[in-house]
Image: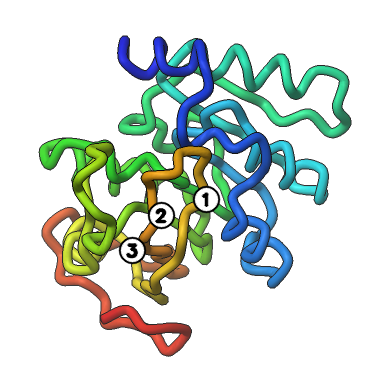
């Protein structure tokens, strides 16, 4: 936590001062539904955009400096997103049920031991029929500049497949303010199916026809 809190006292490479283009594309296509939870919301750019588009938005981040800046940015805006200092690993149903859960750059920072807890927390936060979108760096991103972990399609399926139904996993590009970052990533879309209650050890649901989830 100390690292991220210190980074947010300046401008992190991922804080581009506007929503990620992929988030804008998802919203404009109608993929983002209803009430939105942003896990690892940072300084709130994605949620400020989505709130202005009419969504009821809640953001959580475990870095107090990030949340303070998000609240400052949101001051005076109507509607105003709600921001909280909270771990994404245990959000669950504590903040109510959401139609959409968004992760734009959090998952690739998690340790292996935290991934099952995170997947369960995401599922519990979603209404039946709700969608989860995760944007993370892929194995195509060069390693020379360091940064967070690179993630494969198989890792995404292995982490979220036991809890959620995979709709699509496709390549994207992150936008950053750091020239050495090429931004190769994945956009994965998962759904909590209506009436389905898979347990932690359940087999992954077969991919849907909405995209390439291989």
- How far apart are the two marked residues, 3 and 2, measured between alpha carbons? 26 Å
Considering every residue shown, the one lying at the far front of the view is 179
Of labels 1 and 3, earlier in sequence is: 3
- Left or right of 165? Residue 201 is left
Report which quarter residue 114 is drawn in.
Answer: top left
Q: Residue at x 16, y 36 (%)?
A: 111
Residue 175 appears at what percent x and percent y? 52, 50
- How far apart are the two marked residues, 1 and 3, measured between alpha carbons? 27 Å
Q: Residue at x 41, y 54 (%)?
A: 183
- Left or right of 42? Residue 200 is left
- Left or right of 74? Residue 69 is left
* Residue 164: numbered disc: 3
* Crowd rating for badge 1 (residues with CA inside 10 Å; few <14, some 14–19, many 20+): many
- Depth check, front residue: 173 or 101: 173
Q: Quadrant of the C terminus?
A: bottom left
C-beta proximity under 8 Å, tags 1 and 2: yes
Residue identifier under label 1: 175
> In the rendered image of this protein, does residue 66 appear above or below residue 176?
above
C-beta proximity under 8 Å, tags 1 and 3: no
Residue identifier under label 2: 183
Whether residue 162 can be seen here: no
Of labels 3 and 2, earlier in sequence is: 3
Residue 72 appears at what percent x and percent y? 71, 15
> In the rendered image of this protein, does residue 205 appear above or below residue 197?
below
Q: Residue at x 42, y 89 (%)?
A: 209
């Amino acid at each position: 936590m100390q690292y991220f809190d210190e980074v947010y006292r300046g401008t992190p490479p991922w804080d581009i001062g506007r929503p990620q283009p992929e988030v804008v594309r998802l919203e404009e296509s109608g993929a983002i539904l209803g009430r939105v939870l942003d896990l690892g919301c940072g300084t709130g750019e994605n949620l400020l955009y989505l709130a202005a588009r009419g969504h009821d938005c809640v953001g959580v981040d475990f870095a107090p400096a990030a949340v303070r800046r998000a609240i400052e940015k949101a001051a005076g805006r109507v509607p105003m997103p709600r921001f909280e200092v909270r771990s994404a690993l245990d959000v669950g149903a504590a903040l109510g049920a959401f139609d959409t859960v968004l992760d734009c750059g959090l998952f690739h920072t998690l340790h292996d031991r935290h991934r099952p807890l995170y997947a369960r927390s995401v599922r519990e936060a979603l209404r039946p029929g709700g969608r989860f979108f995760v944007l993370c760096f892929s194995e195509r991103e060069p390693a020379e500049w360091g940064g967070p972990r690179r993630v494969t399609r198989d890792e995404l399926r292995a982490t979220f497949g036991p809890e959620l139904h995979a709709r699509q996993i496709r390549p994207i590009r992150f936008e950053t303010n750091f020239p050495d970052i090429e931004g190769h990533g994945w956009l994965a879309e998962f759904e909590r199916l209506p009436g389905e209650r898979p347990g932690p050890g359940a087999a992954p649901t077969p991919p849907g026809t909405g995209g390439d989830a291989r």
